[in-house]
Amino acid sequence: MTPSPSLHRRARTRTLFAAASAAALTAGIALIAGSGTAEAATSVVQAESYAAQSGVQVETTADTGGGQNLSYLADGDWTRYDGIDLGTTAPLTVSARVSSAVGAGFVELHTGSATGPLLAKFPIAATGGWQNWVTLTATAATHPAGAQSVYAVMKNTQAGDFVNINWFSFGDGTGGGQSDPGWVNIDQAKWNAQLAAFRAMTPRPVPAGSVRVPEFNASCVYSHSKPDDPIVFPGLPGASHMHSFLGNSSTDANTTTDTLLSNAGSSCKPAEDLSAYWIPSLYEHGQVVEPKDVTVYYGSRLIDPSATVPFPQGFRMIAGDAKLQVPTPAGSVNQFYCAGAGGEIGRSADGNWPLCAPGATLMFQLVFPDCWDGVHLDSPTHKAHVAYTYDGTCKGDFPVAIPSLSFLIAYPTSGTADGFQLASKMASSMHGDAFFAWDNAALGHRVKDCVVQRAKCNTAGNF
């Protein structure tokens, strides 16, 4: 975000925009599938998926996978969301992901109209910057039931912009109980045992002259393709766009932690990593271009990487946004690029893809969140249980430091002026999924030896 939001605010027109609310809201609500049947869990509404608004503008978040956010909001600005299912009249948990550099005012949610009954009220404190996100939660003890129009209204006694909003969520507050399959609670006994074994590990001495970078990796090649996504559409074969899978050879729509651990076949090394990783398939002139190799890095971006713990068994998360369809000209954040002799020599006709020199290779690096809430293996958005560190620490709602995961993807192509297309469409929609199924001891030793000690290790976990 630019440092002078007031300049943007003076330039914009404060008018009311009506949108195709059904289509917009459908794109903004996550439906979590369980047991082969799609059923609504906690509804996560992307803030930009409004049916109507006044005084609002939209921008792309700075964090990878954050999608878009409403920006430069001030007193009196509002948005309306139609068809929000508030369930029964039982107490409702309402959350908002917000950021603020100034810390002032409130975001109020009202039902029926901008002045209707108050559903929830979020006090806005400074978060450390306009793109430093926190999740605020409130409980609505009483509220209307069923589908409602919900208004988000900005209230502030001070002039000027005071808040950005990324998304809202509405749920029953069970936090992963039977009635809310979107939140998957960790098995506390198993996690305690895994964590105790990790704490008891004695790190190997780091040899003199070792590169002191907290890192180890899994070295992967393409495994198989399916229009499946066991995180977003579990139990629903063919429900997704086409994905290119890496790692566990059994991965499909019915994948679970147990199926991953019971199948020893993997396109990744080391053999102790039975995790599943996947990305949208890439097409050139209508023909699929599968990655020639993918290095899955496990590292740390923390000031003190010794705080890092392994991923719990069965942990899953997503980076990137399959729905994000915006231009990616040269210089855009988190774009495809060229590596090798000659590098990038031009752009595709639409400007969204690099054209690589004959000796260069099309590449993409996808970075995942590295701070965890310590409670959930997954969440309705597959992102709400994790966050990116912005100051080198994990704190607040996401206090647990997990390895900083990234995919470094190499494609065997240089590209042409015609560019490419992802199965999820534009280059901006690049995203990736990770479903972890490591041998606990193998993962624990790598985190202890390589990440905690800030020492660069190879695929075998050796210095």
Image (cartoon, rainbow, N blue to C red):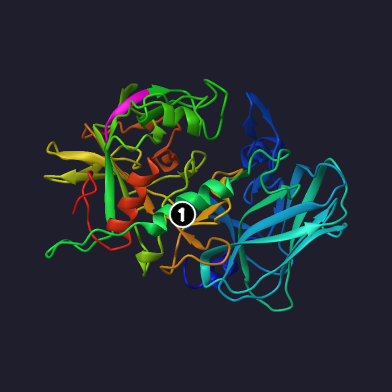
Left or right of 168 in this view: 268: left
Instruction: Residue 86: name its quadrant.
Output: top right
Image position, residue 33 (x, y; %): 63, 31
Identified at 52% across, 39% down, the residue is: 323
Residue located 22% across and 52% down the image: 457
User: Front-most of 232 and 36?
Assistant: 36
Question: Which amino acid type is marked by label 1?
Answer: Leu
Image quarter of residue 114: bottom right
Residue drawn at the location 56% of the way across and 48% of the way down: 189
Q: Vertical placement of 121 versus 151: above or below?
A: below
Taking the spot 21% from the left edge, 48% from the top edge, the residue there is 458
Residue 192: % across, % down? 52, 53
Depth check, front residue: 364 or 371:
371
Prevailing secondary structure of the magenta residues: strand
Residues packed near mark 1 inside 10 Å, few (<14), some (14 to 19) or many (20 plus): some
Residue found at the very far bottom of the displayed protein: 158
Q: Is residue 136 visible to us here?
A: yes
Q: How many marks?
A: 1
Location of residue 176 with respect to 76 vertically, above or below = above
Describe residue 54's horizontal placement relative to residue 274 as left or right.
Answer: right
Q: Which residues are magenta?
A: 220-224
Pinpoint residue 459: horizontal percent, then vertical percent: 23, 44
Describe residue 336's horizontal placement relative to residue 151 as left or right. Answer: left
Quarter of the image for residue 8 reads bottom right
| Rendered location of residue 401, percent (x, y) | 45, 60
The reply, left or right, for residue 147 in relation to residue 359 is right
- Assign a secondary structure to mark 1: helix
Residue 320 in sight: no
Q: Which residue is mark 1?
A: 195
Q: Nearer the viewer, residue 423 or 243?
A: 243
